[in-house]
Image (tube, helix red, strand yellow):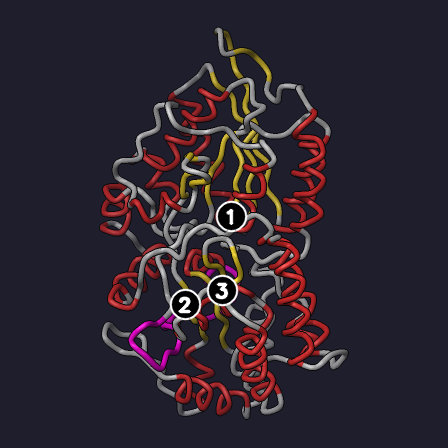
């Protein structure tokens, strides 16, 4: 994630790497020198995002009749598997979507173009968001939105358990209050929340609450004891049905399609609010969003790019691809169409426009961000090369923990050992 939480990044990036260094084939039809141009633009996401993105692309084509855009989208794992294959075959897209775990990986393998000097208008985008797309001083990706962490929950299930969830501005809850709440909900038969131990993103939040971070200057920022404590917490909740059973947790990948909440196996779930529109369109009942629990002033919640757009270094139409990128993040018409399907628009002026006129799911995202603004800190920063391997190993090891194949302590030791190898 940022936005999607994968099991396949490593092999996808690795395969892309082999080819990126050797391939010379250009990716698009037509030429920069003139004549009709055909671009390929790919992303992952839910159906609501796909529909909005295709509509925005249609608006771009209307403005630029000399540019045709072919679009492709899929779920997260399938996306990176296909992207890897396409890049390996010299047929990669011109404009692509990446996240924190993959920007650095793809840049270091020379798949991405440096966007400096391409005429992009970035002055209305917060510097903290832009920093997530920088590698070694170059701007290789542009945030497609702004998101932060949330607990999305079914108010009916929490009310039935006698639990009041803090959702209003200024309201918060401690870890003790949160664990008590989800345990009460779980007593009703459906787990109080989806087991949050599976995703390194939520461990990152927990670390920040405890004055640490995942990475510090390219090195690991935590030790095995930290991870053991985190996984011991989730393990204690599993026994009381505060969190989902292993059979539900192992399917999690951050998408609403595989969500335990959407599958009615839990009453709440931690995710980024850029997924809130997808939850609302998929769940079939009322949902609401609340801040994550915290015992201190630092909530660990941060204003992050949910995903970013990048231009392929191998594209023969970089200028046209950059033009489409600029349209998606800066044009008022695109902002109106895309709404909050990738979180709040990154351009501050477009964000004001979108939230000022928002209704339904878009309004839910805008309202949540407004209510939690005082709890949200700056972006954590880009993850280093090797982070996608660490992310995958984190989830794979947690599967071993929740199915009883390894203890939380031994699992934590294994993650740290493998992570240090990945970063070396």
Query: Does dot 2 land on a helix, a strand or a loop?
Result: strand
Q: Position of residue 388 (x, y in %)?
A: 60, 53
The answer for how far apart the CA atoms under marks 2 and 1 are is 18 Å
Q: Nearer the viewer, residue 190 or 311?
A: 311
Q: State the residue at coordinates (54%, 91%).
A: 188
- First of labels 3, 1 by sequence position: 1
- First of labels 2, 1 by sequence position: 1
Number of residue marks: 3
The residue beneath circle 1 is 99
- First of labels 3, 2 by sequence position: 2
Contact, CB < 8 Å: mark 2 with mark 1?
no
For residue 21, which quarter of the picture?
top right
Q: Position of residue 104 (x, y in %)?
A: 53, 43
For residue 373, which quarter of the picture?
bottom left
Contact, CB < 8 Å: mark 3 with mark 2?
no
* Extent of the magenta region: 280-299
The residue beneath circle 2 is 150
The answer for how far apart the CA atoms under marks 3 and 1 are is 20 Å
Q: Nearer the viewer, residue 319 or 190?
A: 319
The residue mark sitting in front, 2 or 1, is 1
Instruction: Mark 2: give few (<14), some (14-19) or many (20+) Cα within 10 Å.
Output: many
Q: Is residue 292 magenta?
A: yes
Q: State the residue at coordinates (58%, 88%).
A: 236
The residue beneath circle 3 is 221
């Amino acid at each position: 994630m940022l936005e999607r939480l994968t099991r396949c990044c490593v092999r996808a990036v690795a395969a892309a790497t082999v080819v990126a260094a050797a391939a010379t084939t250009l990716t698009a039809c037509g030429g920069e020198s003139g004549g009709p141009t055909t671009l390929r633009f790919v992303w992952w996401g839910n159906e609501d995002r796909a529909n909005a993105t295709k509509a925005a692309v249609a608006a771009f084509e209307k403005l630029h009749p000399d540019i045709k855009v072919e679009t492709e989208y899929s779920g997260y794992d399938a996306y990176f598997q296909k992207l890897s294959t396409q890049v390996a075959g010299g047929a990669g897209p011109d404009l692509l979507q990446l996240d924190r775990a993959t920007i650095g990986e793809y840049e270091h393998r020379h798949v991405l173009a440096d966007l400096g000097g391409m005429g992009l208008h970035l002055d209305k985008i917060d510097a903290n968001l832009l920093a997530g797309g920088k590698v070694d001083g170059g701007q290789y990706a542009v945030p497609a939105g702004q998101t932060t962490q949330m607990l999305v929950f079914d108010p009916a299930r929490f009310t039935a358990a006698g639990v009041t969830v803090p959702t209003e501005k200024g309201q918060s809850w401690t870890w003790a209050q949160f664990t008590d709440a989800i345990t009460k909900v779980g007593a009703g038969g459906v787990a109080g929340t989806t087991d949050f131990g599976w995703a390194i993103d939520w461990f990152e939040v927990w670390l920040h609450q405890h004055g640490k971070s995942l990475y510090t200057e390219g090195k690991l920022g935590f030790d095995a004891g930290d991870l053991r404590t985190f996984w011991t917490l989730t393990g204690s909740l599993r026994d009381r049905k505060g969190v989902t059973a292993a059979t539900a947790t192992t399917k999690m990948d951050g998408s609403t399609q595989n969500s335990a909440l959407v599958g009615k196996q839990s009453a709440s779930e931690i995710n980024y609010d850029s997924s809130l529109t997808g939850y609302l369109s998929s769940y079939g009942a009322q949902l609401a969003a609340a801040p994550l629990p915290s015992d201190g002033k630092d909530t660990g919640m941060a204003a992050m790019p949910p995903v970013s757009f990048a231009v392929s270094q191998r594209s023969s139409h970089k200028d046209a691809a950059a033009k489409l990128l600029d349209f998606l993040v800066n044009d008022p018409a695109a902002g109106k169409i895309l709404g909050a399907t990738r979180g709040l628009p990154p351009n501050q002026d477009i964000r004001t426009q979108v939230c000022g006129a928002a209704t339904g799911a878009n309004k839910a995202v805008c309202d949540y961000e407004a209510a939690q603004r005082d709890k949200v800190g700056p972006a954590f920063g880009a993850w280093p090369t090797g982070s996608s391997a660490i992310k995958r190993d984190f989830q794979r090891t947690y599967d071993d923990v929740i199915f009883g194949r390894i203890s939380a302590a031994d699992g934590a030791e294994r993650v740290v050992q493998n992570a240090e190898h990945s970063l070396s």
